[in-house]
Image (cartoon, grey):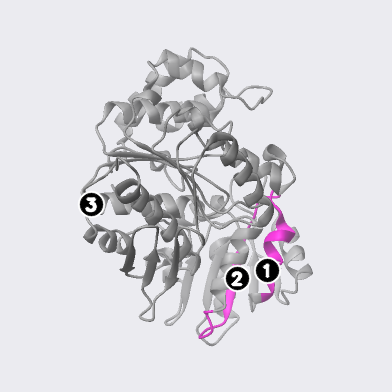
Amino acid sequence: MIDSILDRLTRLHPKVIDLSLERVLRLLDALGNPQDKLAPVIHVAGTNGKGSTVATLRALFEAAGMRAHVYTSPHLVRFAERIRIAGTLPTDPELLALLEEVEAANGGNPITFFEITTAAAFLAFARHPAEVCILETGLGGRLDATNVVDRPALTVLTPIAMDHESFLGGRIEAIAAEKAGIMKRGVACMVAKQGRKAAKVLDARSTELGVPLIKEGEHFFARTAPDGGLFYRGPSVEWSLPAPALAGAFQYRNTALALACIERLSRTQAPPVFPDFPQGALSLGIRSVEWPARLQRLTKGPLVDLLPQGWEVWLDGGHNPHAAEAIAQHARSWRDKPLMGVFGILSTKDVDGYLEPLAARFHTLRTISIPGEAASLSAEDAAHAATRHFCLDAKPSPSVEAAIAELVSASTDPARILICGSLYLAGTVLAENGWAVRF
């Protein structure tokens, strides 16, 4: 039943896409404007790190005993992952009723899938009490359906890099301008460290709107403590905390951005939105963050069962050059075992830009076409691309399972396998490996 209504909603897609907010505003008006009845909103945009920052924020609030509505996209296995209502995912009957109500209110009018499902999320969030509402943009910011919230408590910009150029523009300045569109007059914006060109655009926009920019490296920062933990310093606090639960050195920066939000909303914003936020919740929250398919080690399931003793398999859904650079940087710490890879990517992505920092780090690579994705780069073309970027043993394979079996047979010593290149591939892998979203 859920698949049937999701298919119907997909078929409402306009024949010609004009990026605007008119369609979603019309639908929201028919629903009674639920976007105006939300708990305090933290609105997050950026190119990379959005999901991890949102997941960390959610974990911090929930560790403090607060209910958090969370809207993210895309989903990995089940659509319900996108709409977390006060900490809980909707059941299939609840989700079906919600989507049918929004479908009826839309009256068959052309609307994008993201727009109509965003309206559904807002409707659900407006009907259930919570202390905070965390919204992740889907694409860009200025004309993203989530940007109908007029007065968020805070806006957040993670690192901005090249991605979705066909929609957002082919220059980093154009992409930064779209992301900066979530800024609201007088509302503080927490900003991760940016490249020079993007930072210039954000500075200009903040000046135009009178937006206080709270910048990483200038107003707050984090570093690795001698014991491996995280040391955070902000405008009013210094916190010594555990290491982030999520793997990768870049997660220290994503965690710092989330901590800066907490500090702003509970300590330095007047009046504070969350005046009683307990410091003890910070350590608990950081230790309990979960965000699948971001340098995630798979520890059980059919794919893990294919591995001999001592082998590891990891999964990452990053799909742009900035994400690949972060993975490559983390891979430098993996010196105890050879690194092997299973790689699949959409043809619409910057394939060479993704492979340039990463391909040569693979001792052996098997490439696949992403199952069920018409836009997938073929396994053969992916192997050729990896070879161009100095991966000396890159060959196509028919499936993830076959690729892993080939990699295992190619080495007598334990190795580490990284499955990477696409969030769609990551979702397929998690589904095949029996992963289920926790309620």
Point out the tag, 3 or 2, that comes first from the N-terminus.
3
The answer to whether any part of residue 437 appears in the image is no
Query: Which amino acid, by three-letter code, is at mark 3?
Result: Ala
Seen from the viewer's position, the closer of residues 87 and 161 is: 161
Which residue lies under the disc numbered 1? Answer: 357
Q: Residue 141's quadrant in the figure?
A: top right
Q: Are marks 2 and 1 in contact (CB under 8 Å)?
A: yes
Which residue is depicted at the point 59% across and 60% down?
323
The answer to whether any part of residue 298 appears in the image is yes
Query: Which amino acid, by three-letter code, is at mark 1?
Result: Pro
Q: Secondary structure at mark 1?
A: loop
Residue 339, given in percent of the width and then of the height, sits at 57, 77
Against 176, is 152 above or below? above
Residue 35, given in percent of the width and then of the height, sits at 40, 25
The magenta stretch spans which residues?
333-360
Which residue lies under the disc numbered 2? Answer: 328
Could you tell me which quadrant the N terminus lies in?
A: top left
Seen from the viewer's position, the closer of residues 289 and 176 is: 176
Q: Residue 64's mark? A: 3
Q: Is disc 2 surrounded by few (<14), some (14 to 19) or many (20+) residues within 10 Å?
A: many
Point out the tag, 2 or 1, that comes first from the N-terminus.
2
Q: Are marks 3 and 2 in contact (CB under 8 Å)?
A: no
Q: Nearer the viewer, mark 3 or mark 2?
A: 3
Which residue is depicted at the point 28% across and 26% down?
127
